[in-house]
Structure formats: C-alpha cells, structure tokens
Image (cartoon, rainbow, N blue to C red):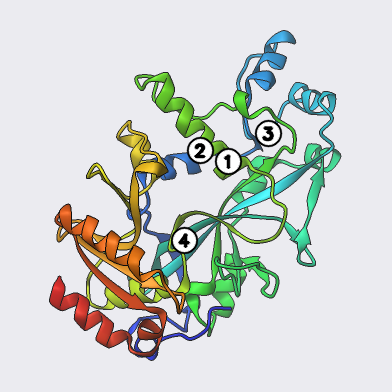
Amino acid sequence: MITNRPEFLIRNLPHYKNFPKRKSLKVDLSNLPLLLNLDFNYLDGIQPITKSRINYLLSHNVPPIVNINPSETELEYYKKIGVREFQCIKIILNFYVLNDIDDDTIEGIPYNVSLMPMLKRGKIDTISIENLTALDLQKVNDNSNIVYTDFNPFQKWNQGMGMSYEIFARLGYDNFTDSLGFNWGIFFLSPVFDKREVKLPENKSYSNEINAKFRRYKTNLYFKNFKNSVPRRVFGCGSPIELFLLQGLHVKNLTPNMQTSIFKTGEIVSNYFDMQRDEVWLGQERLITEVDLYFPEKKLAIFCDGKEFHDAEKDRRIVKELEQLGIQSLRFSGKQITENLEAVLNSIERQY
C-alpha cells in the first residue's frame, strides 16, 4: 500500500478516505491524451491484430473484419500458429481526486492508467482457447466494471480484492480512494505474434517512418506479454510523492501536466501520444529531462526527488539547460512532500 501520506491531504482533500455509498461514477478523461482515449476504443477482443491474421481470413474467403468476438476462422488461425492460451489484460484507472457532481453522482479524475494481467493467488493466470471460445467477449467487456481495492499502481497487486461496482457502491469504502483501481476495459493477449506485422490505428497522412516508430512504441507498451503482476504504466504519475503533490496542487486549484519531456531543441511534449498527434518523433538522445509536474502557461517545472542521494552536478546541469529555454525549476525531496506538503505548496504558489 502507499505509505507516508501527508496530513495535509487527509485534512483537505474531499473523499480522500471515503468513497460514498450508492453513487454512480463518472470519469473525467479530459486530462488524458486524446489518442490514448481513442486507443481505449480499440483495445478489446483478441489482440494484437496482425497482417497474418487478416491474410488468413482472406485466404479462407472471410471478410477481413475483426470484431470483439473472434470468428471460428480466427480461432483456427490461432490454433494453427500454436496458441493454446491467452493472457487476460485489464485496463485500470486510478483517481487522484473524487468530486461530487450532484447528490447521486461522483466524478473521478485519473492520475494513472495501467495494464494488469488477470491473476490467481497473486500469479499470472491465463485463459485457454477452448474457454475463450465459450465466452461472449462483448458481454465480458460490457460487464467489466470491476473495482480493485488496495490497488497501488506503483507495485505488485496481491493484497486487495475485486468486486463489481454495483456491489462496491452499495457497501461504500472507508480507506484511501487513490488506491482503488477501476477497470476501464479488457482484452485477451496472444503470446505469439510478429511485432513487425502488428496493425494499429494510424493517420495515413503521416509519413511511413513516423507511423512505424509509434507502432513499435505502442506494440511494446500494449502487447508485451506479462512476466509478473507489476502493473504496466501507460500514462500518469511515476511515484507516490508525485501523486501527493498533484493532489495538494488540486486543493490549491492548480493543475499541472504530468510527466512532461523537455528536449535540447526546445520542444516540450507531455507524452508520446501527443507526439504522435503532432506527427513528430523525438528520440531520447535529444532529451534534457522528464519533468514530474509542469505548468506550461508559466514555464514552471516541478521535480519530486524520491531518492535521498542525487547527482547534484547532473541536477545543476538540467536546471541550467532549462533556464536557457526560459523554464524555471523547483525541486522538492520526498521528505519535504510527505512531512510538510503545505510549505511545498506555498513555495509553488509563490513561484506560480
């Protein structure tokens, strides 16, 4: 579980330790990248879709249309290439704040999107192709509104429990609500496929080179088979102290961007999804740093230092390079954030 929580949040953040009973849930996805939101609509059924899978359908005079429920021909294809079981992958959202919309509705704002495999007794479980054939995957997807308790997206999940949102909402919850994982989608991952053949939604007006780079990036992000139960971060905060600071800034009505990359050539990009939207690929060799929290309107970068010892020379170099781009920097230790969050927030407010 997440520990060393600031007292400031316990005193000031609404629903920090209480999920109210009998309320419907809305999700504010406006802080997530547009292309990630679009990918949510694509990630269902059996994944990934590949050129070989499409060609197999065509060779059997079956229209190359892939639905959430696989056709008999598609299942034949998987048997032919030796697939006997699939990993069941869940798309999980964690919320950093819960806002009351009205007497009947509460709205969550995500700080983390992650992928997690289906588990059994803490270990990765799979579903056989025979059992998959017997399922209506559309119904599975429609009924996947599961809530996971004690879901810390920064470490293995093996202590909590899962239940439908209907049951969860009837019971209520009196613990830290940012450690609730909300299932937002589900797909079944084949262990066998050629990465070079993966087909993903692309803008055909972009260059082949740009599309190929993002295809490789997303193939590794979405479709790499899991070896353990550690959630795979797709988007969001990288550590608990970043989460604490994000929550504190919300109390102060300040909303930064999470995990912003700043490059030597002056480009400032919030995430790879926005890079894809802008039809640009910026390699890591051009990166100055990745900022934990960033206010683009003020050109203000916030760093959360979780480790006790840092490379001071490297930190000074980063600050200098950012200054040359007109970007101010503030750096806070994990101890400052957990033990005196209000003072940290006051420092940010003054600089802001």
Residue pictured at 61% horizontal, 23% vertical: 197
Number of marks in picture: 4
The residue beneath circle 4 is 112
Marks 4 and 1, Cα distance to the nearest angstrom?
18 Å
Name the amino acid, label 3.
Answer: Asn
The residue beneath circle 3 is 69
Q: Secondary structure at mark 2?
A: helix
The residue beneath circle 2 is 217
Tell me where residue 126 appears, x and y as whole percent. 79, 49
- In primary-sequence order, the first of circles 4 and 1 is 4
Closer-to-camera residue (283/128): 283
Q: Between tags 3 and 2, which lies in front?
A: 2
Which quadrant of the figure has residue 153? bottom right
- In primary-sequence order, the first of circles 2 and 4 is 4
> Are dots 2 and 1 in contact, CB under 8 Å?
yes
Marker disc for residue 220? 1
